[in-house]
Image (tube, rainbow, N blue to C red):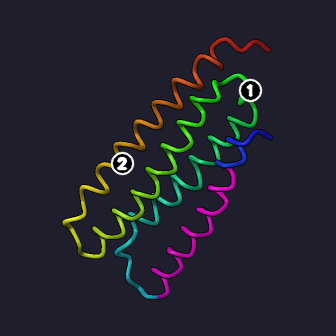
Amino acid sequence: MNSIAKGFLISAIICGPLGMLLGLEMAISNDHGQMPTHAHIRVIGWVSFSLFGFYYFQFGKAVSRALSLFHFWMAQGALIGLIIGLWLVYSGKTQYEPIAAVAAITYALSFLVFAVAAIPVLWTREE
């Protein structure tokens, strides 16, 4: 397994339980104020990172190493920034909303980097 696939899958495996624990904490406390943070951890961290990992596992050798590394670190940084920014905003510290905004834009751009890496490989792939 290549290191990009492994990195995304390990990140996903970490984010899955973290998102679940946040959901459980909200349910137990009956305070659902961090629902957006929970949702982003689960959808980006668990689902998207799993799918990126499986893509790089299957097709990683056909993708430029530099491009896949750039995608990996851009997505990781964006998720960390997004979690921190959302946590602060939904804790009532709305002055930190720019952190969440910049991180969200960075994640969107990282997804475009993934598209640039993935589409040519899939387009030319013959079975």
Q: Is 113 covered by the magenta stretch?
A: no
Quarter that holds the C terminus = top right
Q: Main secondary structure of the magenta part?
A: helix
Q: Position of residue 105 (x, y in %)?
A: 34, 43
Residue stretch in magenta: 9-28
**Residue at image coords 67%, 11%:** 124
Please state if 71 lies on the left or on the right of 104 as rendered: right
Which residue is tagged 1? 61
- Cα separation, mark 2 vs mark 1, equals 28 Å
Q: Amino acid at mark 1?
A: Lys
Q: Nearer the viewer, mark 2 or mark 1?
A: 1
Query: Quarter-wise, where is residue 35 in the image?
Result: bottom left
Q: Position of residue 71 (x, y in %)?
A: 53, 37
Q: Nearer the viewer, residue 80 or 16?
A: 80
Determine whether label 2 and label 1 are within 8 Å by CB: no
User: Which residue appears at 51% of the width and 23% of the height?
Assistant: 116
Quadrant occupied by the N terminus: top right
Question: Among all residues in the image, which is located at the extreme bottom?
Answer: 29
Element assignment for label 1: helix
Please identify the quarter of the rendering in which residue 125 is found: top right
The x, y position of residue 88, in whole percent, is 31, 70
Residue that label 2 marks = 104
* Of pointers 2 and 1, the one earlier in the residue sequence: 1
Quarter of the view holding residue 14: bottom right
User: 1 left or right of 85?
Assistant: right
Secondary structure under tag 2 reads helix
Amino acid type, mark 2: Ala
Disc 1 crowd, CA 10 A, few/some/many (<14, 14-19, 20+):
few
